[in-house]
Image: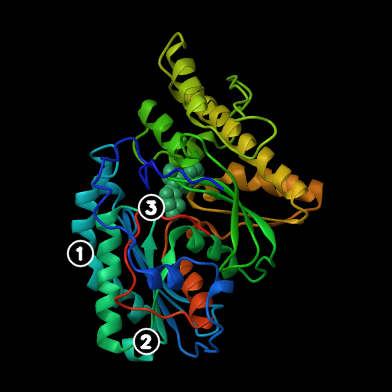
Amino acid sequence: MRFAQRRTPHARAPGVYAESTSVVTQTNKEAVCLSGEPLTTLPPVETSVDKPILGIESSCDELACAVLSADGCTVLSDEVHSQIEMHAHFGGIVPEVASRDHVRRLTFVLEQALKKAGVTLSDLGGIAVTAGPGLIGSLLCGLEFAKGLALATGLPLVGVHHHEGHLAAAFLSDKPPVGPFVALLVSGGHTSLIHVEKLGGPYAVIGETRDDAAGEAFDKTAKFLGLGYPGGIVIDRLAADADADRFPFPDVMAGKNNFDFSFSGLKTAAIVLARAQPAPLEGQALRDFCASFQAAVVENLLKKAFRAVRLHDTKQLVICGGVAANRELRTRAETRAHREGVRLIIPEKRWCTDNAAMIARAGWTRLMCGAKGRDTISAQPYWKLA
Ligand code: KG4
Ligand code: ZN
């Protein structure tokens, strides 16, 4: 198992500024045990959550709070405050701007989530907060706020791995996956194929990107085309009903016999191809270009994901993370799953991009297994999913 330790944790935007990476290190063994280890290694404490769970997510540029029902099945409220407009001005995320805005809005977003769920803090049974990976400043905002809440209310607090949160989004559906399964996690900062025993782990990363994440390739290509930030959703929109065969994109597999990805070559191919056009791309040509690029990214992802399913003796595939909101990815995955007899689970679009319902769901599983912490949990900007 490898992990791209040297990459900016949320290097999802072309303009993400380098941040200090040495501010917080994991020093507390208990914190690792409580929030990072597979659940199998936790002491077998029998507890049950019989009250709703509050989820808090602030790992990057979205600030979200959600309340999940006591049985973990129903999202009672789901508030997301996006900072896209603030960062679009800079063409990417400015970490300091992100954390300052989180601090300003945390209380308001929490109050809204509680109000919409029809609960107060005293009705809750626990708090789940993203502890990493992510931008250190952004993580600290949510985590320290959650610690304060836990201290004031006496509620158990659990630190959640952001990627486990994305996986947990698949469990918010009526028909959740049943482990073991293969998950394709595609977000702005990460692209990996994970073999999941069950929610809570153990997790085995069987492949990941060697360079850019899929969302990053979308965002950087969109930025080059002058489509603004973040670009994934814009490319998705422009590509609708356009000709995906018009522009030739190379098959940029990072080796046919492994499960790794490479998207920086595809991004470079897009830039070279766009520059080689006799006239600037606009109108139908721009739409066809977006469709061709999108098809190349999607094909690349699905080829490896379905191969992983075949070779890992499971008939279930989960696709999650922000890029899983892409319509072409969803449609092609469905067609392929049908053809190959694979059970496909893709969360609703609102739970593909960053949100707190998924954090609450992941936290719910851990709280059910007796995990509880408080001041022992530390922010972990780089954190391996185990
Ligand atoms: O999971 P996410 O919200 O944040 C991270 O954890 O990184 O993913 C954000 C990424 C961005 O790169 C964004 O451009 C991409 O997901 N994205 C999409 C779509 N919606 C969001 N990419 C392609 N098509 C979409 N519809
Ligand atoms: Zn995410």
As drawn, 366 above or below 379:
below
Q: CA distance from mark 3 to mark 2?
A: 34 Å
Give the left or right position of residue 133, taking residue 333 as reference. Answer: left
Q: Which residue is mark 3?
A: 382
Q: Position of residue 4 (x, y in %)?
A: 45, 43
Give the left or right position of residue 76, taking residue 25 as reference. Answer: right
**Quadrant hosting residue 149:** bottom left
Q: Using the image as rendered, state which of residue 50 and residue 7 is in the foreground.
A: 7
Local crowd at mark 1 within 10 Å, few (<14), some, or many (≥20)?
A: some
- Asked if residue 55 can be seen in this view, the reply is no
Numbered disc 3: secondary structure: loop
Numbered disc 2: secondary structure: loop
Q: CA distance from mark 1 to mark 3?
A: 22 Å
Q: Position of residue 119 (x, y in %)?
A: 37, 87
Discs 3/2, front: 3
Amino acid type, callout 3? Tyr
As drawn, 286 above or below 67:
above
Discs 1/2, front: 1
Q: Which mark is residue 103?
A: 1
Local crowd at mark 3 within 10 Å, few (<14), some, or many (≥20)?
A: many
Q: Residue at x 39, y 87 (%)?
A: 124
Q: CA distance from mark 1 to mark 2?
A: 23 Å
Amino acid type, callout 2? Val
Q: Are marks 3 and 2 in contact (CB under 8 Å)?
A: no
Q: Position of residue 112 (x, y in %)?
A: 31, 75
Q: Which mark is residue 332?
A: none
Q: Which mark is residue 119?
A: 2
